[in-house]
């Protein structure tokens, strides 16, 4: 993906979009070399990198710090950055100032905001200022306390109608794509079919226009994974085994050997 138009083009041409949520230089480098279409610097870094319970404590400065590193690693990849909790909900002026900082200081391509109807004016303000916006509906982690936990959304008829309405409103407001998180596959298909912009799913089944997963989840760096995560590697075990081996070799005087020594 070079720009927002490529997202719409991919949908028209029925080409699935891949997005990975990641937060640093080396993982971004690997994503770019692997040909991932888009990197999301997600505020999930609150949990994955900072060890917090939710995304709520993540600051704008945290997002900017990580986004700069990701941009250095993935110079030619389309990068979207999450606007963190309370960086866009207070008022539209604040939101524009904060989104502007992200764009100016990091060199990324777009921002992502969680929510529907309640953030439409803000979305329009950012887009009018030339900042591409990605939407995020379904399970919106910044509202975890209001939602009563990390639960599948859109189970009742009312919830389904609300998510569909918000998806339409976001498209009308000009977002170039929407992340749809933790909803039943049928609802995700309905929304995907209804919209002209691509829907990128996470825990939303296979009928969306693309898929996003967190780098550390799909590479198996945590002991437990949610149902929707496929572990393509047992990363934690591989890393831990290597560290155990290093420790053993140092203690037994095996490392460094002649090959790894300046003689
Ligand atoms: O913060 C994040 O990484 C996200 C994705 C999981 C969609 O919002």
Image: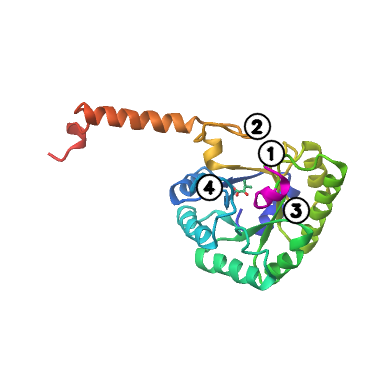
Label 4 CA crowd tier, 10 Å (few <14, some 14–19, many 20+): some
Tell me the distance, in whole angstroms, between the alpha carbons under discs 3 and 1: 19 Å
Camera-side residue of 201 and 117: 117
What label does residue 203 carry, if any?
A: 1
Tell me the distance, in whole angstroms, between the alpha carbons under discs 3 and 2: 27 Å
Magenta highlight on residue 141: yes
Camera-side residue of 88 and 189: 88
Q: Residue at x 57, y 47 (%)?
A: 21
Magenta segment boundaries in residue numbering: 140-149
What label does residue 52 carry, if any?
A: 4
Distance from mark 2 CB to nearest ligand 1 atom below 8 Å? no
What label does residue 227 carry, if any?
A: 2
- Under circle 4, the secondary element is loop
Q: Residue at x 86, y 48 (%)?
A: 161
Q: Are marks 1 and 2 in contact (CB under 8 Å)?
A: yes
**Whole-percent x, y for residue 36 in the image:** 57, 45
Camera-side residue of 18 and 102: 102
Distance from mark 4 CB to nearest ligand 1 atom below 8 Å? no
Q: Are marks 4 and 3 in contact (CB under 8 Å)?
A: no
Tell me the distance, in whole angstroms, between the alpha carbons under discs 4 and 3: 33 Å
Please identify the quadrant where the C terminus is shown: top left
Answer with mark 4 or mark 1, whichever residue precedes in sequence.
4
Q: Are marks 3 and 2 in contact (CB under 8 Å)?
A: no
Tell me the distance, in whole angstroms, between the alpha carbons under discs 4 and 1: 22 Å
Q: Is residue 99 above or below residue 20?
A: below
- Under circle 2, the secondary element is loop
């Amino acid at each position: 993906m070079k720009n927002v138009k490529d997202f719409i083009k991919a949908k028209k041409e029925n080409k699935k979009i891949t997005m990975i949520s990641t937060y640093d230089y080396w993982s971004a480098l690997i994503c770019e070399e692997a040909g991932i279409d888009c990197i999301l610097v997600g505020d999930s870094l609150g949990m994955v990198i900072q060890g917090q319970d939710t995304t709520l404590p993540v600051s704008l400065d945290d997002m900017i710090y990580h986004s700069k590193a990701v941009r250095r690693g993935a110079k030619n990849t389309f990068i979207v950055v999450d606007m963190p909790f309370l960086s866009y909900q207070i008022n539209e002026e604040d939101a524009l100032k904060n989104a502007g900082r992200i764009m100016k200081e990091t060199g990324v391509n777009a921002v992502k905001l969680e929510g529907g109807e309640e953030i439409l004016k803000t979305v329009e303000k950012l887009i009018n200022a030339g900042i591409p916006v990605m939407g995020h509906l379904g399970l919106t982690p910044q509202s975890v306390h209001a939602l009563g936990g990390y639960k599948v959304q859109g189970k009742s008829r009312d919830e389904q109608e609300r998510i569909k309405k918000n998806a339409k409103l976001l498209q009308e407001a000009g977002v170039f794509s929407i992340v749809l998180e933790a909803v039943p596959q049928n609802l995700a298909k309905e929304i995907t079919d209804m919209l002209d912009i691509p829907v990128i799913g996470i825990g939303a089944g296979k009928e969306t226009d693309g898929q996003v997963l967190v780098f550390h989840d799909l590479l198996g760096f945590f002991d437990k994974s949610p149902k929707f995560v496929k572990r393509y590697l047992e990363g934690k075990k591989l890393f831990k085994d290597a560290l155990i081996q290093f420790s053993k070799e140092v203690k037994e005087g095996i490392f460094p050997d002649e090959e790894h020594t300046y003689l």
